[in-house]
Structures are given as C-alpha cells and as structure tokens.
C-alpha cells in the first residue's frame, strides 16, 4: 500500500485527513485524522533487505469519547491489523486515539 492509498483509505471514513498535522489556524472542527510515518520493519536475509514495510501512526482526535467515530475509522482499517491506544490531551481538551498500522 502506498501513502496515497493510505490517505484515500482514511478519507473514505468521511473525516478530514492530513499528513502529520493541519496548517496552523486551518484545522477543521473535531473529529479529524492525522497520520504519519513512524518507523520501518525490514526483514534481512543473506545480508540483503528481503522485505520491508512502513509503520504508520493514524491519530484520531475527538472532542468527546465517540465509539461511533472510532468504529468508522476501524471499519476502513478492517483489513489492516492495528494496535490501538488512547489518551486524553489535557492541553488540547480532546481525546487522541492512536492506531499503529503496518503497511
């Protein structure tokens, strides 16, 4: 999956999407999604890179805890294994739900 395909997949959730962040002063109202490259997973064999994938963080931001919005995001990620975590950002007064995916 390319980064463009990942963006299209995330946009199919119906939420606003940006790579890394929205421009200052131009962020849409919550909820929205940001995503970014985080790391790589490369398998080496016989001294060469045999296979590799990118690890991306998909960040869902919501004003209140919203299982319906989370389900919408998880529905578009349904064929991609993910690890989910959640935190409340006190300074921003919003929830950040993280989906770590490998593509």
Image (cartoon, helix red, strand yellow):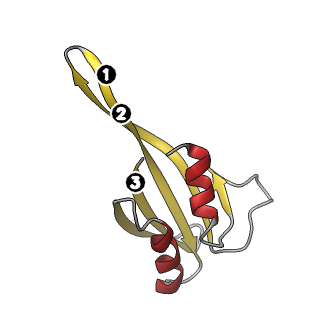
Task: Give the residue pinned by disc 2.
Answer: 52
User: What whole-number distance in Å separates the C-alpha atoms at marks 2 and 3?
Assistant: 14 Å
User: What whole-number distance in Å separates the C-alpha atoms at marks 2 and 1?
Assistant: 7 Å
Give the label, 3 or 1, closer to the camera: 1
Circle 2/circle 1 CB separation < 8 Å: yes
Residue occupying the point 24% across, 24% down: 44
**Element type at mark 3:** strand
Task: Give the residue pinned by disc 3.
Answer: 101
Residue 98 point in image, percent of width and height: 44, 62
Q: Is residue 92 above or below residue 103?
A: below
Residue 60 point in image, percent of width and height: 53, 67
Residue occupying the point 55% across, 83% down: 64
Give the label, 2 or 3, closer to the camera: 2
Quadrant position of residue 53: top left
Among the two numbered marks 2 and 3 on one chain, the one whose residue lies closer to the N terminus: 2
Circle 3/circle 1 CB separation < 8 Å: no
**Element type at mark 1:** strand
Task: Give the residue pinned by disc 1.
Answer: 49
> How many residues crowd mark 1 within 10 Å: few (<14), some (14–19), many (20+)?
few
- Which sits in the foreground, 47 or 68? 47
Q: Is residue 102 above or below residue 91?
A: above
Is 16 situated left or right of 88 in this image?
A: right
Is 51 situated left or right of 28 in this image?
A: left
């Amino acid at each position: 999956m390319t980064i463009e395909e990942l963006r299209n997949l995330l946009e199919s959730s119906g939420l606003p999407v940006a790579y890394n962040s929205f421009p200052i002063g131009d962020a849409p109202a919550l909820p929205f999604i940001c995503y970014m490259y985080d790391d790589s997973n490369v398998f080496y064999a016989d001294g060469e890179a045999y296979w590799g994938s990118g690890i991306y963080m998909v960040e869902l931001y919501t004003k209140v805890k919203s299982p319906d919005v989370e389900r919408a995001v998880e529905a578009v990620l349904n064929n991609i294994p993910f690890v989910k975590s959640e935190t409340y950002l006190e300074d921003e007064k919003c929830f950040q739900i993280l989906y770590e995916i490998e593509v």
